[in-house]
Each structure stands twice: as structure tokens, then as C-alpha cells.
Image (cartoon, rainbow, N blue to C red):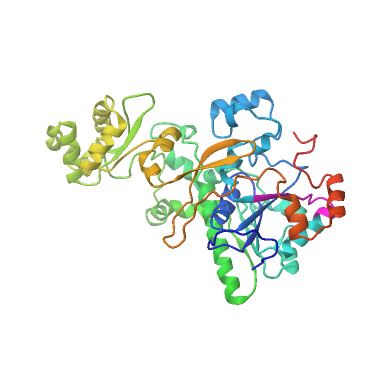
Amino acid sequence: MTTNGREPRSKLPLDGIRVLDITVVWAGPYSTMQLGDWGAEVIRVESTKYFAATTRGQMARPPKEVVEAQARAGGMGYPDNEAGERPWNRSAVFNAHGRNKRSVTIDLTSPEGQEAFERLIAASDGLIENNVPISMEKWGVTYERLSKINPRLIMVRMPAFGLAGPYKNYRTWGNHMEALSGHPLIRAYPNLSPEYAAGGVPADAAGGVGAAFAFTLGLRYRRRTGKGLMIEAPTAENFVPLLGEYVMDYTMNGRVRTQVGNEHWTNAPHNSYRCQGEDRWITVGVWNEEQWRSLCGLMRQENLVEDPRFIDMASRFENRHELDSTIGEWTGTRQPHWLVERLQAAGVPSGVVMNERDALEDRHLHERGFWHSLDHPEAGNYRHVGPAWKASQTPNDTPRRHAPLLGQDNEYVYKTVLGYTDDEYRDLEEKGQIGMDFAPEVP
């Protein structure tokens, strides 16, 4: 483990491990966030001359109409819907996954940048990246090169489709990876075209957790052998096993499942149902006859138990659309939390379909201390999610540090970690490699 230039911190499992982060968008940054949450010193390697779209926002200096569009859409906006003087430090998407990390600016296109990068590789334990391979090869970020500089380096590469094959250099977003994995077609709603499939991209989050796990396996390997290694963790391939039952059903039966939506393959009722209020919903999923009788009792429609259309699971599935309409009439005049509490008490699986406001106000999450307030010098004070899991013998009050400002840790990295002199540091500042603002020509 490297130990030079570390600041004191609580003893977490990854304390003393330094990981370089050349990640973009969501999957890669989410992986390094997991490592930073558990004590690793994660250093983002960024450039003042290049802006990775969606990583620190959609644009370095978004025009007013873009900011307004993001405010309407949600998800990638700015505090108070104001981009501010340095929007890249205020973006919601970056501040969500940038916590517990540092930022250093290094221009990998220059000889001086390559020298600094090599010195940083020599002083680190690992590197994680999720860029299109051709870009990494152009900048010399390959295991063949870096392992010669640091034979103990653990490198995790998680491009969309891997480091070989006809899709190797496809440039893609999470929704494209999911499309090639077959997920949106399954999630699309029955009787609607696939364009109405929900827009979430769990492939990104799953890829991030998978890459973090792969890195910890690399640490285990290095402890046993004393050697580093390169781990290939394609984000799209990581996601396919989450659809394993659909793949197996095809291999065993030649059956292609499409447009399942909120329904189940065999069970009914199993859907989302509108409730009282604007865009309020609950889910209900009945798995056996006892649950079905309990549901009918709560609806005060015990006659449905003996109705030939719903007499057993197969009949209910055959007539599921009529059944959904009946349940929807009952739920439509009632509050979602009121419904779920009574359904759960009766043993019927159910849950409120929450929005972000519901989650932030949820009493269960508050009692568990899931939300953590964090001050950010340019974005303000906001609540952040807690760690993805808890360890009984390792208290972890995270996030401990706000997402870094661009280049916030330049002086620490260059002078403390890499040993640059004051004169050398000033020289790189003058050349534009070291800075806290994107170059004026960066859009």
C-alpha cells in the first residue's frame, strides 16, 4: 500500500489505498464513489482543456436555455436553477457521485502531463476508467504501459463493450448498453410500442458496483501474489446476468419475452395502480391464494374470490386487465401510504411508488440515518445518500468530503504526492495544465 502524502482519517477497510479515477458519466464515477466511501483516497484525473459531457454537467458553460431545459427535466440541474460562475462545480450529477474524492488537473496530451501522470501512477495502487478504448489508447492509458511503471497497479477497465470485438469502440450511453442487452424491450408496457419504455439506466449503477467489487478482488489477488493485474469489466456484459432468467428461458424453451412492463409472467394481480393525488401510485403483487383472499377482504369485495374469472392464479392472469381495472377503482380514491400500510398488515406485498420528495421525507430512511447533510463551497448545503451498505464493526459516517472543485487538490497532489517544487508547479500553472477553471475555448 502507498502511504506517502496521506491525511489522517478514520480507519475504514480501504484506508491507505490510492485509486486514480479517469471515469465519466455515471457508471465509472459510481464505482470510485463506492471505494471512496469506504476509505480509499480517490483522485480524479481531469483536464482544464477537455470537458466530458454529463460528468460535470452537460456543458462547461451551458447557455440559459440549456439550464432552463434541465430545470424542467430534472436530474442534471443546478442549485436554485442557476449555473453560477463555475457550473462544473455546481452540477447535481457530479456532486451526487463526486463525494469523498480529490481532483487534480493533468493534460494527458502534453509531455509535461504525461510525466506527471507517470509519477502519479507510480505512487498509486489502482486506476479505474470507463472510456471508449480508442481514447485511452491515444493517451497511453493502457495496462501494458502502466504496469511497467508500477507492477503492483490494479487497473479496472470498464468500457461499454469490452476491449475486443466489433463493438469495442462504440461510443455509447447507458441506455444504448441496455438496449443491446435487451432490457428496454422487456420493460416496455404491454400494448405500447418500445418507445414508451421507462428511461432509467440501472446498467450504469450495476456496472459501478460491479467494478468496485472487481477492484477489491484485485486487492486480494495482489495481497496473495504481490503483483498487480488488469481487470476487464464491460458495463454492458455486467448487466446481462441481471436478465438471466429471460436468457435461460430462451435457451431452454426458445421463448422471447417482450413488453412485460409492470406485469408478471404468470401471476396476477401484479401491477402499479393509480391512487388519490397527482401522479400517485402503489404496487401490488399477489403470489398465492391467501394473499388474494386478503386483498379481496380489504377491498370489501369478497365475492371476487369465487368469481370464475379470478378463481385461481391462471384464471386471474388470463383476465388480468379486468382485474387491474377493478383494483384501480379501489385504489384511485385512497391515499398511497394508507393503502400500503393496510396491505402490508394483511400480508399482501405492496409499496408506494415514491418520487424524490417522498424518499427525502420518508420516515424509515430518516430513522436509519440514511441522509447526510454536506456543505459544498459553491453548491451549498444539501442532503446526500448514505453508503450503499453498513458494516457492524466499521462505523462509516459518509459522505465525509464534498465533491471536489475542479483542480481543488492540485497543490496537494503535485507537491505532496509527486514532489514537484514551487517553481515547477508555477510553470505548469502558466502552461494551463494546473488550474481550477476550464479553458475559455471549452464549451
175 vs 442, nearest the viewer: 442
- Is residue 314 at least partly visible in the picture? no
Q: Is residue 401 left or right of residue 324?
A: right
Q: Looking at the image, which is closer to me, 298 or 324?
A: 298
Which residue is drawn at the image coordinates 64% and 39% (left, top)?
377
Where is residue 73 drawn, in percent x and y? 54, 28
- Residue at the spot x=79%, y=38% of the render? 439
Magenta segment? 102-113
Q: Which residue appears farthest toward the bottom when viewing the image? A: 225
Whether the magenta-drawn stretch holds residue 192 is answered as no
Q: Identify which residue is drawn at 65% across, 69% down.
A: 228
**Above or below: residue 275 compared with residue 103:** above
Quadrant of the image for the C terminus? top right
The residue that appears at 83% across and 52% down in the rendered structure is: 425
Using the image, determine if residue 344 lies above or below residue 164.
above
Residue 181: x, y in percent?
51, 48
Number of disc labels: 0
Please provide percent x and percent y for residue 55.
64, 42
